[in-house]
Structure formats: C-alpha cells, structure tokens
Image (tube, rainbow, N blue to C red):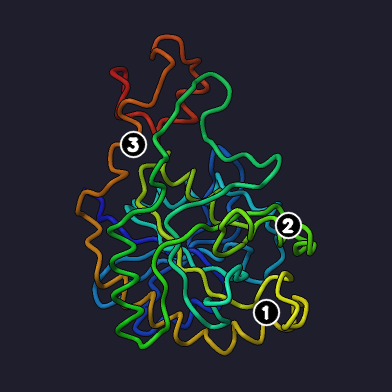
Amino acid sequence: MTRKRIGLVGGSGLYGLPGLVVTEETALETPFGAPSDAYVLGELSGVPVAFLARHGRKHTIPPSGINFRANVWGFKKLSCSHLLSASACGSMKEAYAPTDIVLPDQFLDWTRGRLSTFFTEGCVAHVSFSHPVSTIVLDALEKAAAKEGARVHRGGVYLCMEGPQFSTKAESLLYRSWGVDVIGMTNATEAKLCREAEIAYASMALVTDYDCWNEEHAAVTVDAVLAVLRKNADTANRVLAAAVLGLDPEAPHEASDALRYAILTREEHVPPETRERLALLAGRYWKGN
C-alpha cells in the first residue's frame, strides 16, 4: 500500500525547511497539462512530504498562468492527503501588520476565467464548499505558529483576485467594505481543486503589506513585498515544518469523501475519455473501476 504524504505548496524559500531530507525529485505528466515544476519528495522527522514551487522554482509563472489543476492532480497522484499552502498576502485591516501570519477559513473568489474544477466536459460534480478549509490543518498551523513565536490570527476572509496587478485604491476600499481580511492571488483556486481531489487544505497567508487602502503606508511594490518575505522566511519555514509534524497523513479528514454525493452524471453516461481523465479523483466511486 502506498504511503501517504503531506503536501506543501509555496515559494522556493521552502527548500529551507528545517529537518527536510530530500530523497528525490519527480516531474509528473497529468491529464491537465504540466505542473509548475518538479515535485520535491522527502521526509520531515519521518513524515513523508511532497513540495511544489507554485510559480516554478525560478518564479517564472504569474498567478493567472499557474496550472492549478495539474498541480493539485500531482499532489493527489503522489498520495498527499493534506496540502499546506504558504503565500504572500496584503492586509485589509489595521490589526494585521506586515510579518503577521493569517490563517483564513473563508474565501471570496474574485478571479476571472480560471479553470477551478476538474469536472468540465462529460461529467458534472458539485462538492460542498461552505467550509472550504480543513480545521485539522488549521489547528496544526495555529499550534505551530504559536510554538515558533509568530504573531498569528486564525480565521478571516481571503479575497482571491486575478492579478498580476495589485489593486487600485477604489478596489481596495470596496473589498474593505465587504469585510475582507486579506487579499492574494492564488489560494481560492487551490482550495476548490483540493476539495474536489479530497485533499484537506489550509493556507498560511504571510502579510507583506497593507493594501493601498491605507494611505499612511507606501503603495504596494514588489521590493517591499520581497523585503518582508525575506525577513519572515525563517519563521514561516519553521511554522510549516512544525505543522507537518502535527498531522497524520493516514488519518481521515473533512474532505476524505467530498465526492461521494457530489457527482451528478450517471456512470454509464460519462464518456470513456472523461472516465480516464478523472479516474484518479473519482474512480473509486464508479463500479466499473
């Protein structure tokens, strides 16, 4: 039986995870195209893990160009039961300062034109998404952040914008009026696909700046974002490493059977090519498999 893993997705700085023993790298082919990069496989204190650089290890893929479906399918293929995401975000509230960590439990998807489902031609599925984040993973991240002395905020709404441009001031003020807590460009898409793949997902959002609503702070720039990321990289890496040790890859979780009652298309009506494309995700619910 294949040993399950904990998945990690984020920037190239995650190669510095304390205690990570790299065993191999694997480049996967998927029915949905190529993932962002090769997956780095290894162990953290005996816990098997798989890491992927979301934008490619040289950061050459913009948010809208990420093949999220291929990335998540790859984690599923590698037997990842949980996925911990690390990403930069902008703060929409005065209380969330740069270098703080936010653990959002809700998403507002403001992207346009992204493919955020595996179920397109030939098979329809509607997974429950009212609670899009795994409380099991949130618990592990919160406990790990507290242990590492990080300033952490649990809960809140992550608005996922299209990018790659940062917000206009008008947009930023509108989002604040909605009660949004942080803003980023990737996490909602990952969360939707992880739910369809029956992978427990949660995000560690690292605050790099106040979005442009806050006139007391300088406008958002790449230089400012990178400076904060570098400052907090060690803390973020330690938090992820500690969180992995607080999870059991073999244990059931909230998304373990997300597709059980979600697939509307009768098995006999699913075209053969669609069955083949979705076999890794939905095959166990089809009698013919």
In the image, 85 versus 7, the foreground residue is 85
Q: Is mark 3 on a helix, strand or loop?
A: loop
**What residue is at 58 percent from the left and 62 percent from the top?**
54
SS type, badge 2: loop
Contact, mark 3 vs mark 1 (Cβ under 8 Å): no
Residue 37 found in image quarter: bottom right
Q: Where is residue 236 in the image (x, y as percent from the top left)?
A: 46, 80
- 215 left or right of 230? right
Q: Which of marks 3 and 1 is nearer the N terminus?
A: 1
Q: Which amino acid does label 2 sit on?
A: Gly
Tell me if 62 is positioned left or right of 57 in this view: right
Q: Residue 225: which disc?
A: 1
Give the image quarter of residue 115.
top right
Instruction: Check disc 1 and report its element: helix, strand or loop.
Output: helix
Question: Number of labelled discs?
Answer: 3
Q: Where is residue 7 in the image (x, y as percent from the top left)?
A: 39, 60
* Mark 1 Cα shell of 10 Å, populated few (<14), some (14-19), many (≥20): some
Q: Where is residue 100 in the image (x, y as percent from the top left)?
A: 50, 80
User: Relative to residue 163, is residue 199 depicted above or below?
Assistant: above
Residue at the (61%, 67%) spot, across then down: 92
Q: Give the labeled residue for mark 2.
A: 163
Depicted 215 relative to depicted 1: above or below: below
Q: CA gap, disc 3 to disc 2? A: 29 Å
Q: In the rendered structure, which disc, 3 or 2, sits on the residue that comes first in sequence? A: 2
What residue does disc 3 label?
A: 258
Residue 289 position within the rendered picture, expressed as x and y whole percent measured from the top left? 31, 23
Residue farthest to the top? Answer: 268
Dot 3, how many residues are within 10 Å of its Cα: few (below 14), some (14-19), or many (20+)?
many
